[in-house]
Image: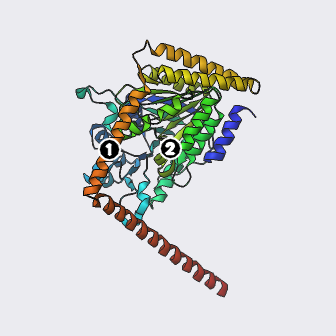
Amino acid sequence: MNTNKILEQLRLRSSSTEIRANHEIKILNDSGENFPEWLAAIEAAQKYILIEMYIFADNEFGKQMRDLLIQKQKSGVKVVLVYDWLGSLIPVFKKFFKPLEDAGALVVAYNPVGFASGLGLLSRNHRKSFVIDGEVAFVSGLCVSSAWNGNAAKNEAAWRDIGVKIQGEAVFDVMVALADTLTSQGHELPEEVVLPAFGSDTDSGSLKAGVVATTPRDNNMMRLDLNAISLANKNLWITDAYFMPTRLYTQTLINAAHAGVDVRILVPKTSDIAWIARVSRTRYRELLQVGVRVFEWNGTMIHAKSAIVDGVWARVGSTNLNFSSWHLNRELDVVLHAPEVIADLERAFLADLENATEIVLNNIDFANMKRQRRLHLKQLKALNRSQAQAISLQIMNLSQAFKGNWHNTATTLVEEREINAYLGLGITLLLFALILWFLPYILIVPLMILLVAGGVSTLIYAVKQRRKFLQNQSAGKQERRE
């Protein structure tokens, strides 16, 4: 079985989604390419527009998008918008979506606060997708917000992010994912929106792609990520906005680096959620010590979520490498088996590294790491020639990179990042301890509310299930009498 077939089988077993052929796929970079494509597609819509969006902001671009959707709805194009209640909290309070609802659009908030929601409120809809007329879909890490455009007045560059435009049967998978979200919130797709049948005449190109729709019930992307890493033989290049991996994922990266895989991770240097960046930096050292290379983006913010394996497999979408994305949220990603498109992603990744600072070990730790790699190489040479060759190449690449680092201003010792990270985390923990010492109810009251909400929600569910059970029993007895 060749590598592609193995990847397809693991993908099917881990995520239960099909890789479909005959697609046209276009990689879209940043808001400069994504936003105009979104607006043009919506402008051209004839039948319906379906959107799942974590943040739909009340700012310049958000208003432009909302007003265009109102215009399309009034012209007879059915608009369906599912936004995340927490991600779009400020627009909710400002009744930002009311004009769109008044125009006749189906506007649904995902997991709004309420007693019956209980601990389910922790699940957020982190997806970012558009479907236009069942013919084209957009899946990305970008939200409907001017934040992605940067701020020229404050000399803030546009955020770095990646999206995918798809034409072909994978569009239907995006529609099915949205329909499932509606069902979870007690709604259905409007009659005007008919899910197309798979196998219909929708060939748009020659490229293979699939859609992975993660929900709190299935953890699809986590399993697929782990399987893809396990099959990497040459390179594994990762971009992630909020890098807080589980121990299982970190160890999988370590194992890949041990096997000689060129593992590179690109994360933000400055983040819109500062504490996540601090936690991320506490993970660098153990990765660097096995040959993983870590880079921090020098721009305003890198918000992309992507992974590339051996030039034959890639994913782009909304899933971050952290517990919330893998286990709690609704996420949406496109899996690509399209070498020409993946080559574009590889070129973009290498270009991104030119605007990044590499985090490196000091010379003593680096020498120890290289010595350990060479010892491992000696042990492998007699057992696994291909793996030994991979480790030899890894040692050579690491040595060249490290030698250049001392003459390159775009490098930082890991100690510099660790000191600030641990200092910030330590001060934060002490501040929380002081606050809780003097104001314990700040913790106790929210916890009690969560426990009460969870208890009430569970009881409501139990009552509903019992009522349904008794109704079924009664119906069964009635059928036996007849």
What residue sits 40% from the left and 65% below the top? 451
Q: Residue furthest top?
A: 407
What residue sits 31% from the left and 30% below the top? 150
Q: Nearer the viewer, residue 459 or 429?
A: 429
Q: Which quadrant: the N terminus?
A: top right
**Residue 318 point in image, percent of width and height:** 47, 41
In this rendering, the answer to whether 407 lies above or below 206 is: above
Element type at mark 2: strand
Any part of residue 22 in sight = no
Q: Quadrant of residue 49?
A: top left
In this rendering, the answer to whether 395 lies above or below 204 is: above
Q: Which residue was labeled with disc 1?
A: 428
Any part of residue 360 in sight = yes
Element type at mark 1: helix
Q: Which quadrant: the C terminus?
A: bottom right
**Residue 272 point in image, percent of width and height:** 34, 37
Q: Which mark is residue 332?
A: 2
- Mark 2: amino acid: Leu
**Residue 392 point in image, percent of width and height:** 65, 19
Q: Quadrant of residue 415?
A: top left
Q: CA distance from mark 2 to mark 1?
A: 33 Å
**Residue 344 point in image, percent of width and height:** 53, 24
